[in-house]
Amino acid sequence: MSSTETLCLKIPLGQQAHAIARQFALEQTTPQKGKQIYLNTLAVYAVYSYLKWLQIDTALEKGDSWHPLKRALFDVADLVIPNIGKLECRPVKPGETAIYLPPEVMKNRIGYVAVQFSERLQEVQLLGFVRTTTISTTSEQISLASLKPLNFLFDCIPNTVAHPALRASQIQVNLSQWFENLFENSWLPLEEVFGNINEKKFALRNVSSLAEDSVARAKIIDLGLQLGNQSLVLLIALALFSKQKVEILVQIHPLSEKLYLPYNLRINLLSDTGKIIQEVVSRSNDNFIQLKRFRGDFGESFHIQVSHGNFTIKETFVI
């Protein structure tokens, strides 16, 4: 079985990604060029979002794909990784078995990521990665069957890890800063994660029922092969309860087209010392689960732990 069958990663494309792609496409002189740029832009944005979740710095607007003249003249889909180089994010249309390499992307690239599109553009799949040094300089295409897992990308980026779960427990999320609109890179606006937020209206009604000054953010949890490449969304919403206390709501959602959570998925609220305060376990048809609302004092720490079988991820928060 090839790597493209075992290590694909689905990335949602929200309203912001489509708005940028639409703007770039409308600047073009022909519909064909507009379609090319639309897909190139979405491909770049998907890889940018993935690296952002991993807290890997990128310079989205410094690539040729974000330059009006260069994207109009050339077929480029590059994403700049500062002090490393350019990563080419090549779209793969339905039915294609290889990624095409235009002459303009054959040089000055650290490698290529294949981004699989379907008929629906609400999400894409990152199929895999190929390092430039491993392909022929005369190659005009790369077979999808020859792709390496995305983990190989991180060999090109010093001081990174190959899985977001490996980093989560090392980072303490400062929730009090959220009230000042200061967010960690991996915590995204709900619209960017869920796309059409109306589809989650029932679950998110609990979030909007918090005080008017509430703030909410969501983070993708990639389960990889642990659960058949399924990803989850950890959602945290908080509001000021008093001058000393904050009220907090925690939910877990499936990502993108998945209707239900994995059966027997556990979410725990842990004290600073690791004591279990709350636990919720998913049933066979749960499309989200949530902890009971709880309150904490400013300066207080707690953990949220998500587990299924042998897989466990723990996020640490300070209010």
Image: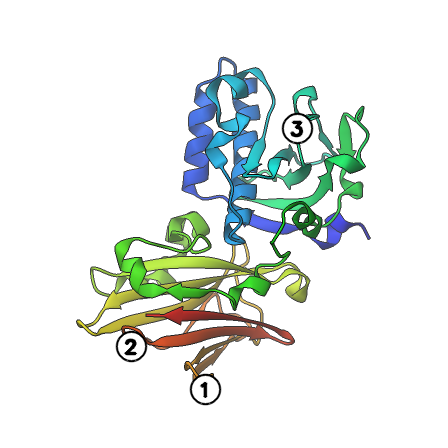
Q: Is residue 307 above or below residue 219?
A: below
Q: Is residue 97 visible?
A: no
Residue drawn at x 44%, y 75% is 303
The numbered dot on residue 108 is 3
Q: Is residue 30 above or below residue 255?
A: above
The residue carrying mark 1 is: 275
Depth check: 13 or 236 in front?
236
Give the residue furthest to the left: 243
The kind of residue tagged 2 is Arg
Circle 1: element type: loop
The kind of residue tagged 1 is Lys
Q: Position of residue 231 (x, y in %)?
A: 56, 59
The residue carrying mark 2 is: 295
Q: Position of residue 155 (x, y in %)?
A: 69, 49
Distance from disc 3 to disc 2, alpha carbons, whole Å, reads 52 Å
**Which label sits in the foreground, 1 or 3?**
3
- Circles 1 and 2, Cβ within 8 Å, touching? The answer is no
